[in-house]
Image (cartoon, rainbow, N blue to C red):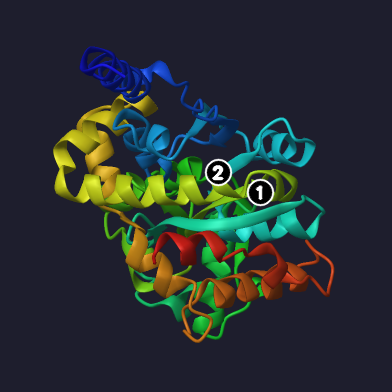
Amino acid sequence: MSRRSLAFLVLLSAFLLLLTGCGGGKEPSKAEPVKFKLAHCTWVGYAPLYIAQEKGFFAKYNIAPELVIIEDESQYAGALASGQIQALGNVLDREVIHFAKGTPEKLIFAMDESAGGDGIIAKKEIAKVEDLKGATVGLDKSSTSYFFFLSVLDKYGLKEEDVTIQEMSAGDAGAAFVAGKLDAAVTWEPWLTNASQREGGHVLVSSKDFPKTIIDVLVMREDFVKEHPEAALGLTKAWFEAIDYYREHVDEGNEIMAKALGLGTEEVAEMARGVQFLGKDENLAFFDQASEDSIYKVAERAVHFWTEKGIIDKGVDFAALIDDSSVKKATK
């Protein structure tokens, strides 16, 4: 073979190799992102989801959740039970109820906890929790305010029968208290701050005094998790990164969340001051079964109260609701 022929073969081989290296050989296509619907109500505790969306953390983990705001609990609970949505941000004690009533769901990670944003406001004469005995209290029994109130009463040795409850929304309870129509109210901001508009009105106790009580969590349908475990893990990782980002860019994070929720930036900033967002480290500690403040203990307390009130039946295996695999994998 001549040198010219040999040189030609060498050049040809190099050319073919170059083609392969630059896309001449077809690369496997990237899998389509996992699409699903994730619902929540208008609350700052869920809003870091929009930071994850805005900053590309969902795309990073090949998921494409459609974030849907649904304000009414019966609607979003029904949507998860029927499979119209695949994921939901909601309060832990309420999800215990939904799970007990047959919704096939798994709790994937914790999102935030109320740390002063909820509480009991009371008139001047009610200086301590024990003074609530015989008082008329405004309360929404269909919300987590009820769980919070029962937790407070239980700690101080009171029973629900020791007070007279007037059922109304938390906002209406706050307004009625300021107007002098109630002795006390279980409510949230801005009514905790507004309590002082009534002479002698004050915050008796707040969720800051009762940590690990009002906890927001992310749940997914069990069948979806089985079919797409990578989506549950990806969503967990994206959430953790969103919380890290928020802590380093608070002002920008508040702007993103405010725009998504249709609220003012200052309003969102004020709401955020009353919650603790739960990132990687907080979730790892919260899912530790050996901890006295673990998610299992909070769920057990909810089961106890709701069974006692006849809201759920006895024998609920609350541990079957909780799936710690994504938190464990995401924190390695």
Q: Residue at x 56, y 80 (%)?
A: 154
Left or right of 27 in this view: 200: left
Answer with mark 1 or mark 2, whichever residue precedes in sequence: 1
Residue depicted at 50% across the width and 82% down the height: 155
For residue 299, side relative to residue 210 (left or right): right
Other residues around mark 1 within 10 Å, as few (<14) / some (14–19) / many (≥20): many
Q: Can you say whether 132 is above or below 267 in the image?
A: below
Note whether 217 is above or below 315 in the view shown: above
Give amino acid for label 2: Ala
**Which residue is under mark 1?**
225
Foreground pick, 23 / 187:
23
Image quarter where the N terminus lies is top left
Question: Can you see residue 55?
Answer: yes
Q: Is residue 296 left or right of residue 24?
A: right
> Outermost residue, front direction?
1
Q: Secondary structure at mark 2?
A: helix
Q: Quadrant of residue 37?
A: top right
Label 1 secondary element = helix
User: Which of the two residues, 266 or 192, is positioned nearer the viewer here?
Assistant: 266
Q: Is residue 137 visible?
A: no
Where is residue 147? Give x, y as percent: 58, 64
Q: Residue at x 47, y 35 (%)?
A: 62
Query: Which residue is disc 2 drawn over?
Result: 231
Q: Nearer the viewer, residue 158 or 276?
A: 276
> Which percent across, then down, holds residue 251?
15, 38
Q: Residues within 10 Å of mark 2 (few under 14, many from 20)?
A: many
